[in-house]
Amino acid sequence: MNPFTLIIFGITSNLSQIKIIPALYDMEEKGLLSGISVLGVARKKQTKKEFYEYINKVAYLPNVHHKHQIKKEVYERLCRKMSYIDGDLDDPNFYLRLKNTLAKESNIKSRVFYLAVYPGLYEMVFKHLKKNKLTQQKNGWARLIIEKPLGFDLKTAKILNRLLGKYFTADQVFRLDHYLGKETLQNILTFRFGNGIFEPLMNSEYVDHIQITATEDFGIGKRGAYYDSVGALIDVGQNHELQMLALTTMDAPVEFSSQSLSRQKVKILKSLVPSKVVFGQYDGYTKEESVNPNSTKDTFYALKTYIDNERWKDVPIYIRAGKMLKQYVTEIVVVFKNPINRLFKHLDCGEEPNILIYRIQPNEGVVLKIVAKKPGQETELEPSYMQFCYKINPEGHFFPDPYERLLLDAIKGDQTFFNDAEEVEAEWAFVDPLVSTRGKPHIYKPGSWGPKEADELIEKDGRAWLEPSMDFCRI
Ligand SMILES: NC(=O)c1ccc[n+]([C@@H]2O[C@H](COP(=O)([O-])OP(=O)(O)OC[C@H]3O[C@@H](n4cnc5c(N)ncnc54)[C@H](OP(=O)(O)O)[C@@H]3O)[C@@H](O)[C@H]2O)c1
């Protein structure tokens, strides 16, 4: 790898602690960081020793995404690649200091700027990076990684996109949605377009409906200030769940490239017709740290939508997400129609629909639920799974974390699994009108599947939310 510097603005942020630094550790352990130097930035003054102590502390923090053993020698190797400067990103003078610091390594001409700070600072950062010629790509390259929130509504997303366009070229901007770095989400493309037998079934002739679920069995933790400014629909609906929907339903791209994929995703996002949305809030949310005691923000939502095109005509798509629910699970479920000529419909489970499950977490895999004959003399049926699972050790980390994968893609200049400006705007154009209907949320019990109104939303159509099964791809 040609030498380059990764500059992380907000190295002391929660995002750096739980995602970016652990990803760097894993990359170092796999030998993927040769030629890299990492420069952390935050306002806090700290000596080199204090910075290394901080990195050390982060490396050993209990982290659900990073459970494996931390090796001292790997951590020490990583530390040798890392340095720190304090500075206020609101201060124009800081950027000259940054430029001088970067110039000390005169052999390094390429840079990735990772913004792990809040969007209020973006314009200042963009402007002064450009003013100090740090975005120039004369002898190397310069790239920018930003992640959600990419705007707070369509209007602010457009403003952000205009700003990005003013200070960067499109090939420099990497809008990160970490769900796109998840193995199973990427595998949807291979599964659909790399095989012959599934794609012919992906249409209204065969599919009854689709369910998308992204639920967590824990609350907002210490992120109350941020979460209470957005709510569930904006936090995960506007981005992750719409990306899942687009990958599951889009037409085949003409080639495996960022532009082709994005074009197809945008077509789906622009054809979405919302039907109804239900907002919920878990009992006790308003007592959480940094949450407005009178907050009406949604910690849960469920919605129904349609895709206005020939392929998916009249196929409803039900989407739900939320916190403090019964199960930690993210999945896309395609429920197939029942043909009238099923031979065993008089038997138990004889009319169970086939369902295709893309399980994104926790037990990743792609699974087809079928009925099979129960072994024995009698003709009896039982539900079973045909499954593609990953042979992973949950304590290991051979399986790259989404941040590791996407960081590497950005370093390689590969935007395939990043969003472009049009995608982000199309997502907001769908979500904005729904957000505007947000009234008082329905209160639900922690540990439940959300408010009863969410059940009614789907039951009115003679369907029901499927209880996510953990009987396959066990980890
Ligand atoms: N945390 C997550 O899980 C997560 C997930 C997805 C996206 N994000 C996004 O990532 C960004 C950071 O979120 P976070 O929750 O991780 O934030 P955070 O924990 O509040 O950290 C903010 C960081 O910004 C630095 N900072 C603030 N003002 C600064 C200034 N004027 N100059 C220089 N540094 C400054 C802070 O360090 P000092 O105070 O020392 O300056 C700190 O390192 C946000 O845009 C957020 O939406 C976060």
Image (cartoon, rainbow, N blue to C red):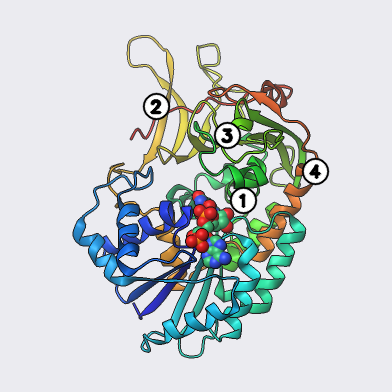
Quarter the C terminus occupies: top left
Circle 2: residue type: Asp
User: Mark 2 packing: few (<14 Cα in 10 Å), some, or many (20+)?
Assistant: few
Looking at the image, do the residues carrying marks 4 and 3 touch, with CB atoms under 8 Å apart? no
Q: Earlier in the sequence, mark 4 or mark 3?
A: 3
Circle 4: residue type: Ser
Q: CA distance from mark 2 to mark 3?
A: 34 Å
Label 4 sits on residue? 436
Disc 4 is placed on an element classified as loop
Residue at image position (60%, 65%) is 260
Is residue 192 visible in the rendered image? The answer is: no
Residue at image position (24%, 66%) is 77
Disc 1 is placed on an element classified as helix
Q: In this rendering, which labeled residue sits more in front, label 2 or label 3?
A: 3
Disc 2 is placed on an element classified as loop
User: Mark 1 packing: few (<14 Cα in 10 Å), some, or many (20+)?
Assistant: many
Q: CA distance from mark 1 to mark 3?
A: 25 Å
Q: In this rendering, which labeled residue sits more in front, label 1 or label 4?
A: 4
* Placement of 195 over or under 411, stated as above or below: above
Looking at the image, do the residues carrying marks 2 and 4 touch, with CB atoms under 8 Å apart? no
Circle 1: residue type: Asn
User: Mark 4 packing: few (<14 Cα in 10 Å), some, or many (20+)?
Assistant: few
The residue nearer to you, when weighing 346 against 332, is 332
Q: Earlier in the sequence, mark 1 or mark 3?
A: 1
Residue at image position (51%, 11%) is 347
User: Percent from the top left, x then y, of residue 455?
Assistant: 66, 23
Q: Earlier in the sequence, mark 1 or mark 2?
A: 1
Label 2 sits on residue? 471
The residue nearer to you, when weighing 122 against 292, is 292
